Amino acid sequence: MIPRYTRPEMAAIWEPQTRFKIWFEIEAHAADALAELGVIPKEAAKTIWAKGKDATFDVARIDEIERETKHDVIAFLTHLAEIVGPEARFVHQGMTSSDVLDTCLNVQLTRAADLLLADIDKVLAALKKRAFEHKMTPTIGRSHGIHAEPVTFGLKLAYAYAEFSRARARLVAARKEVATCAISGAVGTFAQIDPRVEEHVAKAMGLEPEPISTQVIPRDRHAMYFATLAVIAASIERLAVEIRHLQRTEVLEAEEFFSEGQKGSSAMPHKRNPVLSENLSGLSRMVRAYAVPALENVVLWHERDISHSSAERMMGPDATVTLDFALVRLAGLVEKLLVYPQNMQKNLDRLGGLVHSQRVLIALTQKGASREDAYKFVQRNAMPVWRGEGDFLTLLKKDPDVRKYLSDAEIEEQFDLGYHLKHVDTIFKRVFGEA
């Protein structure tokens, strides 16, 4: 994590003090359950809570102990004993380090998911507002980057809305999948701790008991979580790239908001660059990069190893913090996006009516021309227009083969822009519902 791309609320989830507080809560809830089962004295469990719940853990002291022990959980437990006193001997009974580490990680990932879901809601709200604003604003659709047929700018935003709606549903599912707790002891057999302790801790921490753990929670759950973040990042970049293309000087159909006093270039005072969109492309690549180590972390030796640990210490904070920042930036970009309908119309007209070529093709076939002949008639009139040598409608009216099948009025009818937009309402109802 670097401050430039970090928002405080998400960063707080991954701070050492937060992590140690979650570790304490796991240990203290386990002590409660052990006390209820008669394994440890109830007074000991009360003392653990009383002395630890409001404690500020000394991160420097824990680091100092770890430098000697070479073990982070033991370092924490040693420091906790300094706070709690003699009753600390009842902490961590029957548990293994992974019980604490894995359960804590899943608490952090679920909290991060909650923030990310709120971020996606901001993106969806911005997209919906702007989509309805430009529901019937005509613009050219492009395939392979080349003018194809008319769409509306509202449809472009509706595509993105539908995509982020799917992203939200996936993240809800990924959150549920990763929200498990393991308090099962060494190699996951519950030999030294009752399964009811796990059930108690899971409920207290807002998780579900892991059905079967092998000392670690299975990493396919985490792989799905980070893969979901990667797909969301891909959706961010898809929209960012669309905006970058629309802002190109030759297109200029939409543009990032350019604030008073903002500078686009240190050398060229005239520049207005799509810096936010380009930034989102870069950040999205970083989030997607963590999908691969998450998948590789699934493959652990036997009941456990720690080859996943070093990767997760980086990918947990980095992926969630980066995606959080990117989603909020995207929401702001969409909210303030400058849209230029006049330029959209100018680009629609740029090819002299060629965008209506398919309608002419279909009209000819409906009047009796073979598809092969109809395609030939239309294309031979389209190519001169493509080279800037005439107007498509005029050339079609002069073509004797076309005139065999279509009158002037019938040819002109195929150039109605509204024909392409007649199902926009239907699409919007599918995406946004009847409301």
Image (spheres, grey):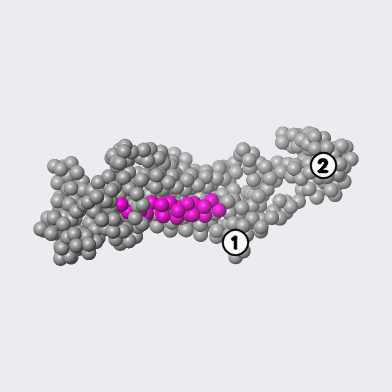
- Please give the range of residues in magenta: 162-182
Which residue occupies 35% across, 52% down? 210
* Total count of labels: 2
Drawn side of residue 410 relative to residue 269, left or right = right
* Residue nearer the viewer, 289 or 209: 209
Relative vertical location of residue 307 with respect to residue 100 in this rendering, above or below: above
Q: Quadrant of residue 303?
A: top left
Q: Please report whichever mark, 1 or 2, sits nearer to the chain's N-terminal start.
A: 2
Report if residue 317 is visible in the image: no
Label 1 sits on what residue type?
Answer: Gly
Q: Which residue position holds label 1?
A: 433
Report if residue 79 is visible in the image: yes
Label 2 sits on what residue type?
Answer: Thr
Residue 235 lies within the magenta run = no
Where is residue 88 shown, x and y percent of the image?
14, 57
Q: Which residue position holds label 2?
A: 365
Relative vertical location of residue 293 with respect to residue 170 in this rendering, above or below: above
Q: Residues within 10 Å of mark 2 (few under 14, many from 20)?
A: some
Which residue occupies 88% across, 37% down? 400
Query: Could you say which disc has been placed on residue 51 in the image?
Result: none
